[in-house]
Amino acid sequence: MRVLVTGATGFLGKALCTQLQKQGHTLSIVTRYPERVHSVFGANVESICWNHQSSLLKALEEAQAVINLAGASIAGKRWNAAYKEELVRSRVETTHTLVDSMHRCKQPPSILLSASAVGYYGDCNDKMITEERPAGSDFLAELCLQWEAEANRARQCGARVATMRLATVLGPGGALAKMLRPFPSLPINPWKLGLGGPFGSGKQWMPWIHIEDAVGLFLWALQEASLDGPCNAVAPETISNLEFARALASLYGKQASFPIPAFLLRLLLGEFAESLLASQRVVPAVAKRLGYTYRYPELLPALKESVTVLERVFKQ
Ligand SMILES: NC(=O)c1ccc[n+]([C@@H]2O[C@H](COP(=O)([O-])OP(=O)(O)OC[C@H]3O[C@@H](n4cnc5c(N)ncnc54)[C@H](OP(=O)(O)O)[C@@H]3O)[C@@H](O)[C@H]2O)c1
């Protein structure tokens, strides 16, 4: 089928689009930088600028499905008022533009898979979180609520809408790359030096997913007609942040002996620190009920594979 993708040039988007191409789907990519699309996916992939309304409309008329991943990086910068506004605008306004354009199509795509995040739930202490849990009330929760509300408007033009509430994605990029290379210009890996540790007390539940399963869930969601509504894109094994830190340190033969105190995280990262300290015991109730099979259901093999690939990438 023809699939229109936004945010295709990002960490998850690149991996997903590569698999979509391998499966024989044709891509139309909506982007801020069309030249980057061609260097990543080849000259034959159609790229459309967000502000080119007529091209967006034409591409949507031709597409059977839309995958919406666009958004400024959650961990891209210290959160201040301006960056928080960009985090919202780059998700809510882009999704609004996309869905408005779907409404204007004579024959709109029949599927919209839209990224969201486990941040939807806010801090839930030890409670088990399925898709039925209502949204939290912090900044990220409200952002996810608005983001999903925009995506859900596509139902009014007949589309099946799945909002994929992603956990931290483990793979050759994203949060793990930032943990292993906190200073991008310096090849210093604190975990290799035995200086890694949990965030704050480390007691908070920390949902995660391996990138192969994040991609796998989107590919599955494209075909799974009974998936309609929210879907927790998380691995089945629930772990605490301390267990995550211990597993990561063990891969370097070290212990997670250096917790980063909550006050320091807040000082360095601003309000973003709250999402690292929030406790979210999220389980993939919908994916399990509808029969998705995980490639990496457990943390250690997922982390081992991701670290191995990342170390290779760092050496290049
Ligand atoms: N990776 C994770 O751990 C994780 C966890 C939870 C949720 N998510 C969500 O899943 C989606 C994909 O994640 P990702 O890790 O692949 O993100 P990413 O690497 O940061 O890529 C996101 C893409 O969004 C577009 N984008 C960036 N800033 C933008 C802006 N200001 N306005 C409009 N578009 C912008 C870019 O595409 P162009 O440059 O081509 O326009 C970029 O390649 C994101 O929405 C993210 O919030 C990811």
Image (cartoon, grey):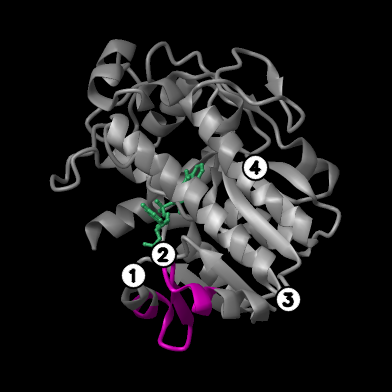
The CA span between labels 1 and 3 is 28 Å
Mark 4 near ligand 1 (CB under 8 Å)?
A: no
Q: Nearer the viewer, mark 4 or mark 1?
A: 4
**Does residue 266 sit above or below 207 in this rendering?**
above
Neighbor class of circle 4 (other Cα within 10 Å; few <14, some 14-19, many 20+) is some
Residue 304: x and y in percent read: 46, 44
Q: Nearer the viewer, mark 1 or mark 2?
A: 1
Mark 1 near ligand 1 (CB under 8 Å)?
A: yes
Q: Does the CB distance between marks 1 and 2 fall below 8 Å?
A: yes
Mark 3 near ligand 1 (CB under 8 Å)?
A: no
Please give the range of residues in magenta. Answer: 38-56
* Residue on which disc 3 sits: 106
The CA span between labels 4 and 3 is 22 Å
**Residue at the limit of the structure toward the left, as seen here:** 186
| Mark toward the start of the polypeptide (4 vs 1) | 1
* Residue on which disc 1 sits: 33
* Residue on which disc 4 sits: 149
Label at residue 9:
2
Mark 2 near ligand 1 (CB under 8 Å)?
A: yes
Element under label 4? helix
Q: Nearer the viewer, mark 1 or mark 3?
A: 3
Quadrant of image for the C terminus:
bottom left
Residue type, mark 4 in image: Ala
Residue 301: x and y in percent read: 54, 43
**Does residue 41 sit above or below 211 in this rendering?**
below
Residue type, mark 2 in image: Thr
Nearest the eye: 198 or 262: 262
| Mark toward the start of the polypeptide (4 vs 3) | 3
The CA span between labels 2 and 4 is 24 Å
Label at residue 219:
none
The residue that appears at 36% across and 34% down in the rendered structure is: 84
Quadrant of image for the N terminus:
bottom right
